[in-house]
Image (cartoon, rainbow, N blue to C red):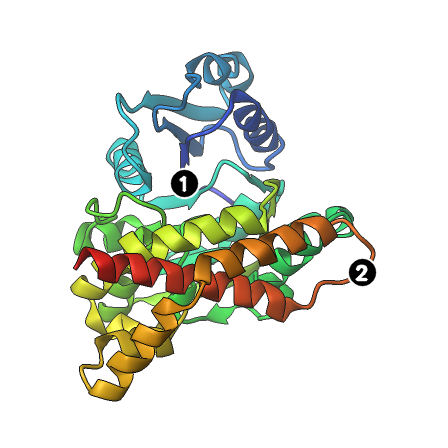
Amino acid sequence: MQYNDNISIVVPAYCEPSKVKRFMDAILNIDYPDNLIELILIDDCSPVSLEEIAASYGEAFKDKINFSFHRNQVNSGRAISRNVGISLATNSLIMFIDIDNLLEPDAIKKIVSFFHGKHFTAARINIRIDPARLSTSNYLRYFDSRYLGARNIPEGIISTRFFASDGIILTRDIINTIGGFDETFYHYGCEDEELGIRVSKAKYDFYFLPDAKAEDSDTPTLRRASERMVVYASKSFPVLKEKHPECVKDSLFSSYEVMLDDTRHPSKLLIKVVHLLPLTTTRKSLLWLCDKLDTKAIKIPDFIYKIVLALSYIEGGRLRQLRM
């Protein structure tokens, strides 16, 4: 097949320069015709400016990758950063990917081959952790198992509940029709879910592309996921629920959200009892235990991680109610 379609890759980053280097090196290994890839790096006011490391790739990208760099003057969050990337992008096919996700050499060919001739379509790529790393951490194994690629899902239409901007592609036609990311989301989470809901409401197809792959080179931890879940439940999901009340049925902890909204006495009493439980102490005790056992040969059951994340979410929900 002749690969002659242009694609813009938008990469928001709030990180150390070393992560940019790792990502850029992977970009240089991409097998795709010269000057058809536009790479846009958005430095979301990282503590150490990414401009110097980005500029160091100028010669390597010359006559191969059309590269542009933008640094936000203040830390603005994922939604604003991605929208800045959209405003700078010049192509009709736009990909959003996280700085930790390293594209495989043939990934762009797989993507443009799928999108060729399509106009109102979105897709998600197959992101996985290097199998060689999974034996080093119980949580890494669990984290990797949550990716779609670990579930052996074939190429095809999937629910937009899996719409996550760590590796998605949209046509310019979709963005021009329904808009970009909602900039009212600043804290962790929901800005990509909200866009996915609008994609679904507009009846646009959302696909999973298992053959378009990237490696997640990050080192996620249960502790980080737990803290993020508290923020997600307390600050981000309430905004999403206000904008799209129907999202509750597909939410991470829908039963809890339904009870929060239920004005009947039994539900209100149950929520009150749950919120009186030592959520934080229990969560932190389980985190300590999981940290201690993370690199051990003993396998931590998946349900332990799910309990920690559920406790984190409920803790966030309790904080949400205290503000009301």
Amino acid at dot 1: Ile
Give the percent coordinates (x, y) of residue 83.
26, 39
As drawn, 303 above or below 226: below
Give the percent coordinates (x, y) of residue 219.
61, 42
Give the percent coordinates (x, y) of residue 213.
59, 51
Label 2–label 1 contact, CB within 8 A: no
Disc 1 secondary structure class: strand
Which residue matches tag 2? 298
Task: Judge left or right: residue 191 versus residue 11.
Answer: left
Which callout, 2 or 1, points to the residue nearer the camera?
2
Which residue is depicted at the point 83% across and 56% down? 297
Q: Quadrant of the C terminus?
A: bottom left
Task: Judge left or right: residue 10 versus residue 142.
Answer: left
Which residue is depicted at the point 76% across and 62% down? 299
| Residue 318: quadrant of the picture | bottom left
Q: Visible in this render: residue 103?
A: yes
Mark 2 or mark 1, earlier in chain: 1
Between 277 and 235, the residue placed more toward the observer is: 277
What distance separates the C-alpha of mark 2 from that of mark 1?
45 Å
As drawn, 53 above or below 141: above
Between 116 and 58, the residue placed more toward the observer is: 58
Q: Visible in this render: residue 116?
A: no
Amino acid at dot 2: Ile
Task: Judge left or right: residue 192 versus residue 35.
Answer: left
Between 46 and 173, the residue placed more toward the observer is: 46
Which residue is depicted at the point 20% across and 86% down? 264
Give the percent coordinates (x, y) of residue 146.
57, 63
Which residue matches tag 1? 7
Which residue is depicted at the point 35% across and 58% down? 316
